[in-house]
Amino acid sequence: MNLRQDLAARSASIIEVKHGDRLDILETRRRLVRVRTAEGIAGWVDANLLLSAEQMELLRRLAEGARDLPSQGSATVFDQLNVHTEPHRFSPSFAQIPENGSVDVLAHRVTPRAAFRSKTALVARTAAAAKTTKKESRKTAAALLPPPSYAAAVPDDWARMSRPRASDLPGYAVPAAAPPPPADDWNLVRTTDGKVGWVLARMLYMAIPDEVAQYAEGKRITAYLAIGEVQDGDQLKHNWLWATATPGLNPGEFDGLRVFVWSKTRHRYETAFIERNLIGFYPLQLAEVPGGAQKGFSLLAQDKDGLVYQRTYAFSGYHVRLIARTPASRPGTIPSSGSAPLTGAGGQPAPTGGWWQEVSAWPRSWFSRR
């Protein structure tokens, strides 16, 4: 981040600071803040690019808690991509994925494109001085208000006077419901150096081999796993399981499954199993199968009865079969800045304690101070 010499956006840059550098706040001008580095150099910067010490600590805890979460597949980017603190286009960016860089996908979220409200706690004055100024401002505003007015009494025949209502008129049509606000798909990702943050899902490309990805049929691959190896001469090939989603916003992380196996006879990938019209949730992961001779995988899916079940499948050769279906909890949610709920990292129900509980308390603690 560059510190500017003056308030103007085109003002010359005087120094570059890195993520994690401590800055002292000297003064604020609306959304611009004058800060001072540890070397004593002062400059101006946008307040939305700053994080408080508490936010930095919470980011560190988030990274620590997500260190062992199951990856839903490795993804790459074809251009530099910013990693955000929250699933919002205008939230602070604290890291950048380089071109052709790789990340692990952990969770998914759909967020409406609402106005972003920065949660950075920037205080340039003492609390007492701010409180006094606020009190004086209220007194001044009260003195400028006109005298109160009194509403007239409601007539006794108000109901008769209110007719006919619009709905009583011939040809009245019920207004169409307003369309839902536009929203964005976001993924929680973990970088190679352990940072955890949010990126736009459409900017990620799952790093499954092209000879398999070519069968996506216009759908977006949201998760994938290698479920076995095949030695074909001097080539080592993997069998793959993937989950895909239809373009657009979906109630789950994926709506279809497919298993690809490598054919030694035809020397190509062939479909061994396919399932459509799912409402599936993370995590998609390998699972233990009784006997140990077969491979297995599991996922969370919502059935027609509206309940969520954990499905476990066994895989052997070209055969995939459902071997267990047990009731499970609906994926946990973590509220954040008034947006849509987030499926718990990895899609698992959010635990009742620990770092997930601290993360879920962020919005309440931030807004209570505003």
Image (cartoon, rainbow, N blue to C red):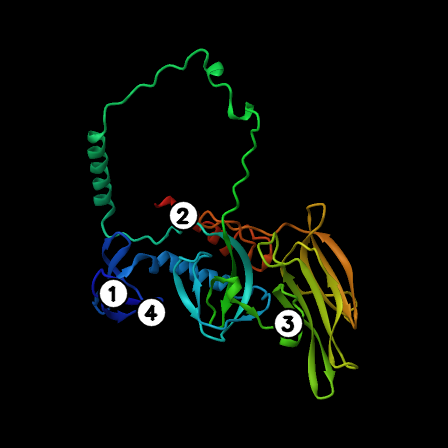
* 225 displayed left or right of 339: right
Q: CA distance from mark 3 to mark 4?
A: 38 Å
Viewer-nearest residue: 182 or 305? 182
Question: Marks 3 and 1, Cα distance to the nearest angstrom?
Answer: 45 Å
Question: Which of labels 2 and 3 is toward the front?
Answer: 3
The C terminus lies in quadrant: top left
Label 3 close to label 4 by CB (< 8 Å):
no
Residue 8 as seen in the image, left or right of residue 231: left
Q: Which kind of residue does numbered mark 3 sit on?
A: Ala
Q: Which residue is mark 3?
A: 213
Q: For marks 2 and 3, give the CA distance.
A: 43 Å
Q: Secondary structure at mark 3?
A: helix
Residue 365 tag number: 2
Amino acid carrying mark 1 in the image: Arg
Please give the residue where the numbered disc 1 appears in the rendered image: 10
Say which amino acid is labelled 2: Ser
Count residues near mark 2 (Cα–Cα under 10 Å), then give few for <14, some for 14-19, many for 20+. Answer: few
Nearest to N terminus: mark 2 or mark 4: 4
Query: Depth check: 27 or 245 in front?
Result: 245
User: Where residue 18 is drawn, which disc sits there?
Assistant: 4
- Amino acid type assigned to the residue bearing label 4 in the image: Lys
